[in-house]
């Protein structure tokens, strides 16, 4: 079981690449649980007492609407981890979790994880490294994916903002950069890069939250699907 | 300076939302450094002794080609953190870093950070929570961004693989799921979801690394830009 658990841990995004001894210590605090079809793992609002790693079968994570309608947020399969955010943050589970079929999970209790992280600062550092590295990769990918459509959406937003402000060339951003990024379907880092690129090409000039439209024709082109 | 540093820390993606006392403890180990234009912070291959948080000015992170040509990987500005991956992982900096203009950074030494994480397991848990929460958000965003184009690319890949295998309906995936996801411009989690969705709609049937093409017309439609 320990060896199996170690292999499983090493296949999961949260632990992949940890040194063998740290994988072993994690495996040693894991509690195996066999599941029957339909078995509940936790309910929305329960204190987050630990997170789960799927060994086999699929787990459905879902919310219930006021009318009792089920809204599936995610299905987790072998090697995937769920429940870790509220466990690390020390809050409640934000949804229900239930086994879709017979299966097996490993449970990592919050107190045991906290104790292990305290005793093994190397493990905390390694997990921070794994997560930061994935975040860097994801940021790059989002940037690649965003560069196709987000400049056009941003151009459309700026033209609309100008129209709303009586056609002024200088428009004030009335939302935070985080909110604007979300609206346009990207992240603030990528939005900043796109704003920089549009500035370098003299399409706009950015002064804090004031943006001056320098080349409306080019902005219209972008909004209509031309490449930046 | 401590208050300023605390505010700056709370504006950076790595530390945003930490409780005030933990921000204060981080601020207390930060070493302020004023930079002149062109000043080097570290060189490619140096042991990663600490990471940096930009207080003002911009930092260029770049590689040098064998011919000595500079390839800029990223510019970091106010509130952004860099160098944290090799510091957490305990390796070397993978590139050069230099100030583009006069500015200021806060330096967090690896040993001081490790000591703080050991003494304050709550800080380690909170940082893991911040990073895991961002990863979940990024995963969702990548999925949204991928759902438009990746099914088409995957369909094209499967049709091509079938052609290469003499038009067989049953094709063997000759690359790992991670590599295939990268090739198609997404992440393994999203690729799995797209494969599931294509199975549910009876376009394909998946048995491990064997994929059977059930509906070629629909796959051709997808590859030509129809929606899944």
Image (spheres, coloured by chain):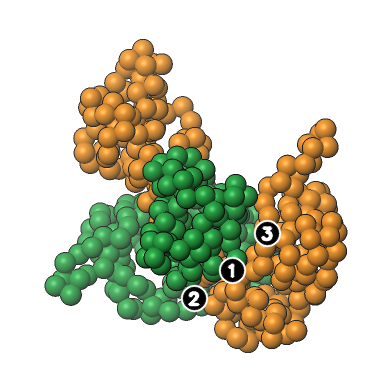
Chain colours: A green, B orange
The residue located at (41%, 41%) in the rendering is A225
Q: Residue A93 location, x and y as percent?
A: 37, 73
Question: Which of label 3 and label 2 is nearer to you?
Answer: 3
Residue A89: give its label.
2
The residue located at (64%, 80%) in the rendering is B7
The residue located at (28%, 43%) in the rendering is B197
- Looking at the image, is B221 positioned above or below residue A29? above
Co-location on one chain, circles 1 and 2: yes
Closer to the camera in the image, B208 or A72: A72
Q: Residue B83 location, x and y as percent?
A: 71, 59
Q: Which residue is mark 1?
A: A208
The residue located at (31%, 23%) in the rendering is B170
Closer to the camera in the image, B63 or A62: B63
Label 2 neighbourhood size at 10 Å, few (<14), some (14-19), many (20+)? Answer: many
Q: Is residue B1 visible?
A: yes
Q: Residue A203 location, x and y as percent?
A: 55, 50
Where residue B54 sits, quadrant-wise, is bottom right
Separation (CA) of disc 3 from disc 2: 28 Å
- Looking at the image, is B33 positioned above or below residue A59? below
- Looking at the image, is B89 positioned above or below residue B168? below
Element class at badge 3: strand
């Amino acid at each position: 079981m320990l060896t199996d658990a170690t292999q499983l841990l090493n296949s999961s995004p949260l632990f992949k690449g940890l040194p063998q001894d740290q994988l072993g210590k994690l495996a040693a605090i894991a509690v195996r649980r066999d599941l029957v079809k339909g078995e509940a793992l936790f309910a929305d609002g329960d204190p987050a007492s630990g997170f789960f790693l799927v060994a086999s079968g699929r787990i459905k994570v879902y919310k219930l609407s006021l009318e009792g309608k089920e809204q599936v947020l995610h299905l987790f399969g072998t090697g995937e981890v769920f429940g870790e955010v509220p466990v690390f943050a020390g809050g409640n589970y934000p949804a229900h979790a239930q086994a879709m079929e017979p299966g097996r999970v490993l449970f990592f209790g919050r107190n045991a994880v906290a104790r292990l992280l305290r005793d093994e600062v190397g493990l905390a550092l390694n997990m921070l490294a794994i997560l930061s590295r994935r975040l860097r990769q994801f940021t790059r990918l989002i940037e690649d994916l965003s560069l196709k459509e987000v400049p056009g959406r941003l151009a459309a937003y700026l033209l609309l903002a100008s129209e709303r402000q009586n056609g002024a060339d200088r428009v004030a951003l009335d939302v935070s950069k985080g909110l604007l990024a979300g609206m346009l379907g990207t992240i603030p880092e990528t939005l900043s890069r796109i704003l920089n690129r549009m500035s370098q090409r003299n399409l706009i000039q950015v002064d804090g939250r004031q943006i001056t439209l320098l080349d409306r024709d080019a902005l219209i082109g972008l909004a209509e699907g031309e490449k930046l």
